[in-house]
Image: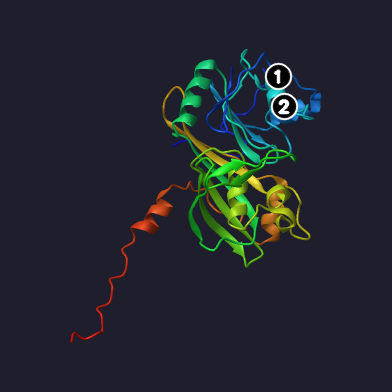
Amino acid sequence: VPVMSGGGSEPWTKDGDYSASEGQQRKHDGPAKSNASEAELQALRDSVIFYDEVVLAINKPAGLAVQGGTNTSIHVDGMLDALKLDSKERPKLVHRLDKDTSGVLLLARSSSAAHALTKAFKDKSTRKLYWAIVTGAPVEREGLIDAPLAKLAGKGGEKMVIDEKQGKSAQTVYRQLHRAGRRAAWLALSPLTGRTHQLRAHCEAMECPILGDGKYGGAKAFIDGMSNQMHLHARAIDFPHPVTGHRVVIEAPVSEHFATSLKALNFDPKTPTKFLTPEIHREKEEKPKPKAKPSRLRKR
């Protein structure tokens, strides 16, 4: 399996899309526009970590929106012309990340590649790995979070809540990589479904909100002396190549504030990247139960 990381596999050279939150298609009236400066366009070009003839990936910085919205004029969707590289065709978004989430963002460089990647996301033949620093630590070192999510009614922006009756199925596999007592933990997370804010809501449901995520964790999401930015990073993605069908893994280095926090908490930044699977949960379920001890009661 090819693994692409760091600066990418190749040096960068000068010369109706599908938008997931897995499974939600969006139509465009035309190419999105942006008011980005040349410096911002160059920063986006510099964020390219992998490309070939049909696929491109960037290491999206935290704070950059993928698509436009209210009061959002600078976003990846509006700067896609800057990512044409050696092609005449504008790349296409095939999934998205929250504005404050950093990491791997995959794009298609042709319509056929967009169709193939869209299908891969929809039929779940892609795998995604996120890293998060959370406040507190989960009770179990690893497991499956199975908690349906629904949109919270009211103002204040989009927010998801656990709703057993009206919520849509949402599942996340997690594993604790390191912990600093009860202060904080470093988690690997793999979403098995693609609900809005799924990882953020699920971490909060474990009473371990993501560090810097005040929207879901409130005051508990912050640690004195540490960055207030959200510590959620799309570390890696594994997908079938649109042309060859071979599995490709692309990794993205963590952001500066994430790396600084790892160091402050004495977490080993060289921890290897490992994808998680539902087997984490199944293995626990399949462990043989201890045999019941024979009753000590005597028959009369």
Residue 284 lies left or right of residue 115; in this view the side is: left
Q: Is residue 34 above or below residue 290?
A: above
Asked whether the residues under the numbered discs 1 and 2 touch, taking CB atoms below 8 Å apart as contact, a structural biologist would say yes
Q: Quadrant of the N terminus?
A: top left
Q: What residue sits right under mark 1 in the picture?
A: 32
In this view of the protein, which residue sits in the foreground, 78 or 146? 146
Q: How many marks?
A: 2
- Kind of residue at badge 1: Ala
State whether residue 198 appears in this view.
yes
Give percent across and percent down for residue 168: 52, 40
Going from the N terminus, do you reach mark 1 or mark 2 first?
1
Disc number placed over residue 68 in the picture, else none? 2
Question: To which quarter of the image does residue 86 belong?
Answer: top right
Q: Quadrant of the C terminus?
A: bottom left
Give percent across and percent down for residue 146: 49, 49
In this view of the protein, which residue sits in the foreground, 169 or 36? 169
- Label 2 neighbour load within 10 Å: few <14, some 14-19, many 20+: some
Disc 2, SS? loop
User: From this viewpoint, which residue is outermost toward the front?
Assistant: 300
